[in-house]
Amino acid sequence: MANSTMAAGAPDTGTPGNMGDVRRSNLSLVLGCIVQSSPSTHVTRAQVAAATGLTKASVSSLVLDLLDAGIIREIGLNPQGERGRPGVGMELNPARAVMGMEINVDYIAAGVTDLSGTLLLHRTRERDNRNSAAGPVVAALAALTAELRAAAEAQGIQVLGGGLAVPGLVDDKAETVIMAPNLGWNLEVLDLGSLLPGVPLGTTLFNEANAAALAELGYRPAGGADFLFVSGEVGVGGGLVISSELFTGPDGHAGELGHVVVQPEGAACSCGGTGCLETVAGQDAIFFAAGLVGHGRADSLARLQAALAAGDAAAADAVARAGHYLGVALASTARLLNISSVVLGGHFATLGEWIQPALTESLARYAPGKLRPEDISLSAVGEAGALLGAAGSVVRSLVDAPYRLRAQQ
Amino acid sequence: MANSTMAAGAPDTGTPGNMGDVRRSNLSLVLGCIVQSSPSTHVTRAQVAAATGLTKASVSSLVLDLLDAGIIREIGLNPQGERGRPGVGMELNPARAVMGMEINVDYIAAGVTDLSGTLLLHRTRERDNRNSAAGPVVAALAALTAELRAAAEAQGIQVLGGGLAVPGLVDDKAETVIMAPNLGWNLEVLDLGSLLPGVPLGTTLFNEANAAALAELGYRPAGGADFLFVSGEVGVGGGLVISSELFTGPDGHAGELGHVVVQPEGAACSCGGTGCLETVAGQDAIFFAAGLVGHGRADSLARLQAALAAGDAAAADAVARAGHYLGVALASTARLLNISSVVLGGHFATLGEWIQPALTESLARYAPGKLRPEDISLSAVGEAGALLGAAGSVVRSLVDAPYRLRAQQ
DNA sequence: TTATATAGTTCAAGCGATAAACTAACTCGC
DNA sequence: GCGAGTTAGTTTATCGCTTGAACTATATAA
């Protein structure tokens, strides 16, 4: 088929290319090369030149820009027993960081990660956001980030920008949450500028499942760059990663796995549809089917696990049902998008061992040979997945366009 | 969400950018601008400069390259009653063409289109390819294309390259048909070089549904650049167009709409799965349910139309059933990929008026507000859709990389 | 005929990548 | 301990490409 990856330097938009684009592109190439080798693998200019194909002269010049921008720093020489002059090592500047943030149904959270993605500071605050408008929630989050930012700066760490993950459809350009049924939000405009005032890269808005998918990408072995991440929260979401890039569809919010129809004669869904996966595999649906009602979310999940461990039949049935229909949805998705790898997150990861038998059987029936048991894995990122992914995305965007920082200062 | 469209000039591959890339990129930009205004809208260098943002000097230089390559030509001055010196019009060179080719179950076909996509010559040859290996079929097609190419050259038209559409999964790099169940092909390597010996751009292999989707794109109003094309043939295929680009998934063969699970308790499918859309909405399934057996394909379709017109209950039921489940599959797809526009092709277009009531009702039930009746349209491309799309793709790839032709001669 | 407006070309300048020459710093062998 | 060999990184000249301004060309309007 026609190659989707276009030739280097080809603009996919109507803007003319000038030589500055070449520089920006190569700047990103060099930084990307340094990022890949981090942490502390002691990449030298010569190695970067060899890896990228650029000349030593170009790399030197580009590296100078990155040093000026403070994105990377030099570390001591490499006195290994090699012949010839030792190269000067480079690494991501550990004094630069980004803030990952999350707003969810019953908590807000924030964390500071360095540019290599390591979580340095992390704080969660319980808060019932279900009946709260966006304004007060963002204000509460701003207070939390201010604390963390001060703590980071006390250690000499500068926060360059932030990423906020929200369980709903978002429009990152307009800083608007288009729809977040579980928060009760609809077309809420968020004042992202108030979260990290004055940071050079600003704050970007992300869908929670997509952010978690990107976080997962960081934990996968090399080459595992194509997968569907399934986010099991109150709703069921999905994040589609193709060639290490998030696929977000025409308007930027593809991946609503929860509303794939798995039971044409099934129950009505909150979205207005019928027989959606969410009606059988969402947290509320599983808890209800298992006879668990009226507890908190985390509490219900713990009780469900206990019931499963105790051999409770209703609990086992509820989970098996969810697994079966998850398999139907995944089979359709695998065929439609040619996905051959799935990562289960949220409650699907928590219930992994109990849900897998039914899921495996279902996949064998609906997508034989396409999604085998070994193609399904459980999420490696924990609680802070969405937050880490949002922060990581900000770093990725910086790596893609390092000149943004150079221009700012 | 993280922007998927990268900055102009940013290579998504690890190759370093040099200034030649800028030129190539701008060459494509200029040609793209000329293509958009064709045919015979009299685009001048000055208009191209204004539209692209490039300077007049750059456009002049780039246009010279395109003229040298023979991709465009100048047409007379524009003596309109405007003030100032009239510009020199430019258009795609009508003496350059590409060959579109198609191998299907019971015929082979080829056609010559000019660079603006107009079909100049077209010839179809009936041939039962179901029990034939790839070699003889390609040889028969090569004979057909040789005839057409000679006819084109007799008119002074040079064929630059070709595109071949096949009803199956393809690997265009390896020139291999990975799987074409309806042809009985499995990992057949095609000798594409024999089809159009000596042409500068060679021959590229395409999936039929994807090619037809791209052909459809040419017929859609401006702005309608995101849609799912549904190909209704023996199998049910799909072509996903996003931002005027084909989305082909991780390995290049996404879009298998026919194997979305719409009936978890349904019939076994030839793919090994259960309840796939193809088992209720493929041509064979509809014909069987309508009580039509043992006729040729085109004949069966005509008989089915006659039965529907006559008010035959079994025929109406079969088509309604197909429409209902097509709606289920489209609802899932719309949610998963955030598609808001669907184009029906093949037998779904032929049966349009009879299938739409059930489809509309189904969509209202499974994807309320997401896919409304006005979001569903019937294909505007006819029989030659796949062929036209394959040819158009070759032109698109030439427009994306015009330097390929410049380098050749 | 003159003024004005638009199209397209020419030319000097600037920027960025490249290749080759050059300097710097280390290891090895004697 | 010292020169030869080896590798890292910088300097310098050159080339390619876009740009902006000046310039030429060709139309309409008064």
Image (cartoon, coloured by chain):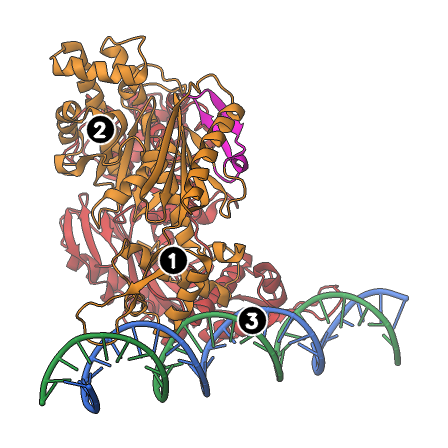
Chain colours: A orange, B red, C green, D blue
B362, above or below B119, in the image: above
Parent chain of label 1: A
Q: Which mark is residue B58?
A: 3
Mark 2, secondary structure of its residue: helix
- Distance CA(mark 3)–CA(mark 2): 56 Å
Q: Position of residue B232 (x, y in %)?
A: 31, 38
Q: Which mark is residue A349?
A: 2
- Distance CA(mark 2)–CA(mark 1): 36 Å
Q: Is residue A114 left or right of residue A303?
A: right
Q: Are marks 2 and 1 on the same chain?
A: yes
Q: Which residues are magenta?
A: A172-195
Q: Is residue B280 left or right of residue A175?
A: left
Comes first in the chain, label 2 or label 1:
1
Q: Is residue A305 left or right of residue A39?
A: left
Question: Can residue B409 be seen at all in this image of the molecule?
Answer: no
Dots 3 and 2: beta carbons under 8 Å? no
